[in-house]
Amino acid sequence: MALIKTVSPEEATGKVKEVYDVMMEKAGVIPKPFQMMSPSPALLEIMLQSLGYYFEHTSLSFQLLTHIRLLVAQVYNYEYCVDFNSGILQMLANVTDEQLENLKSDPKQAPLNDKDKAMLLFVLKAVKTPDSVEQKDVDALRELEWTDQDILEATHHGADMVRHGILFKTFKMD
């Protein structure tokens, strides 16, 4: 049982209901991290806006972003999002159980093109060992035609998973 009182989809009113309605329309589900944020309608709305921004991103693909969420969640033992994003990859990207296991044990095995895989590996390095990131790491992404905006936003997306994982564990949302 959660340590904070969250708003269930059935109880939602006002801004929380508005966000839940959008999530139901777009995803068909209200993920637990959204319910976790429901005591703060303003933060819940920001979370929805952020997700919407990434879903419409022109250079960071849906598959890349899902791989980032999955693998960062795995690094931080955020099981809900590991399972949720694994399911997304299986349903929408036809990733097999074997590919998922290979991906989880060796992210270099991600079924992504070389450019996306380089970004994925950079984000994982950044969230695991930020002090180890060097200029050459950023330059290597630029050589693959990633912009500084792309690099920042992909890393931000990964870092967001750390924040949400901490909150999820803190408030016992499982």
Image: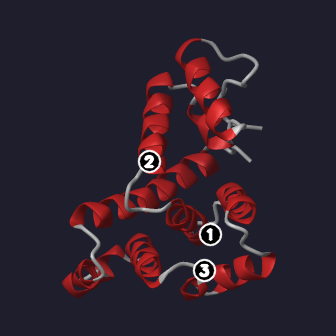
Residue 102 position within the rendered picture, expressed as x and y whole percent measured from the top left = 69, 85
For label 3, the crowd category at 10 Å Cα-Cα, with few meaning under 14, some 14 to 19 and many 20 or more, is some
Mark 1 vs mark 3: give the one in front.
3
Q: Which amino acid, mark 3? A: Pro
- Tell me which amino acid carries mark 1: Gln
- As rendered, which of 37 and 10 lies closer to the eye? 10
Q: Residue at x 67, y 26 (%)?
A: 5
The local crowd at label 2, few if under 14, some if 14 to 19, many if 20 or more residues have their Cα within 10 Å, is: few
- Label 1 – label 3 distance at C-alpha: 17 Å
Q: Which residue is depicted at the point 42% across and 62% down? A: 60
The quadrant holding residue 71 is bottom right
Which of the marked residues, 1 or 3, is nearer the chain's N terminus? 1
Q: Which mark is residue 111?
A: 3
Residue 30 pos. (x, y %): 68, 36
Which residue shows up at 53% across the image and 50% down it? 164
Q: Where residue 56 is drawn, which disc sits there?
A: 2
Q: Earlier in the sequence, mark 2 or mark 1?
A: 2
Amino acid identity at mark 2: Glu
Which label's residue is closer to the chain start, 3 or 2? 2
